[in-house]
Image (spheres, rainbow, N blue to C red):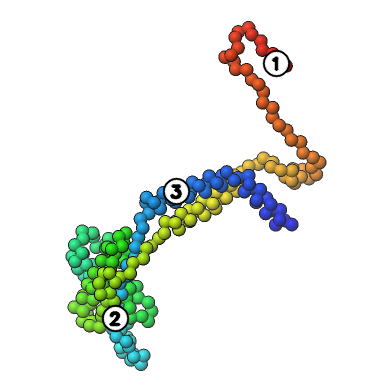
Amino acid sequence: MEQRIDLKKFLRILKNRAVTILVTTLFVTSIAVIASMYFVKTSYEATEYIIVGKEQNENSYTENQELIRILASAVDLIKSPIVLNAVRTELGDQESLKELEEKISVQNNKDSQIIHIVIKESDPERSKRIAYVVGNVSVQKLNDLLNVKNLKIVSKSESDISVKQVGDPLFNIAIGLFAGLFLGIGLGMLKEHLDHSIQDASEVEQLLGLPVLGHVHVKRKEKNLIPYKSMQRGEISVKG
């Protein structure tokens, strides 16, 4: 019974504070729309794959350990200044090593011979270009410095690299809508908590411990006021 009463009270609060909830929801949603359209740039991810070594024999412990060592070295070398400087030279870019490094993510799943080079950029074609160059330069440096021969990249050209969009403006707007709705409900509950006026007869019964015998609906009458400027001195206006 108490849960039913609490639910009715909650619904009454939503009804009484509907304006607050609606205004807050529209305000937060508007901010999300503006941010998604003008401030949050759409990003793209291009992924290049490097295959390290050849298929290994499960009984060859030495070869497996060697493969693990090569994978670890490859992951460290790809984001090193040696590779990044060579990539900058080939791309002909003026961006710093730090900016280029922030765009690169190197991943290697457990027990996998494949290294994922993920490039995050605002331009899809440029992301493919960087991914392809990083992959080629990394293979070249690994061959030269570590004498690792069993390396190859999957993509034969930039057009073979897949690109996917990261972040959806509609998804951001949906998040803003739900965030505004919950914030509006929270503000409505707060205003209701701070409002000490009596809203219905049940509150009177709870406060006084007496039953309510009836309701009196009082309507305010609008008085016909005569503007002060319209009356001349000495005039008296009487309305019946």
Q: Earlier in the sequence, mark 3 or mark 1?
A: 3
Residue extending furthest toward the front: 159
Q: Which residue, as the protein is rendered here, is positioned at the far bottom? A: 59
Residue 133 image-quadrant placement: bottom left
Residue nearest the viewer, comparing 157 with 187:
157
Amino acid marked by disc 1: Lys
Residue 204 position, x and y percent, is 74, 43
Residue at the disc numbered 1: 239
In the depicted structure, whether residue 34 falls above or below residue 57? above
Q: Position of residue 119 (x, y in %)?
A: 31, 66
> Which residue is nearer to you in this view: 203 or 22?
22
Position in image of residue 210 (x %, y %): 80, 44
Binning the other alpha carbons within 10 Å of mark 1 as few (below 14), some (14 to 19) or many (20 upward) gives few
What secondary structure is found at the residue carrying circle 3?
Answer: helix
Figure quadrant of the N terminus? bottom right
Above or below for 227 versus 174? above
* Marked residue nearer the N-terminal end (2 or 1): 2
Q: Which mark is residue 52?
A: 2
The label shown at residue 31 is 3
Could you say whether the residue bearing mark 1 is in a helix, strand or loop?
A: loop
Choose the circle earlier in sequence order: 3 or 2: 3
Q: Is residue 102 visible?
A: no
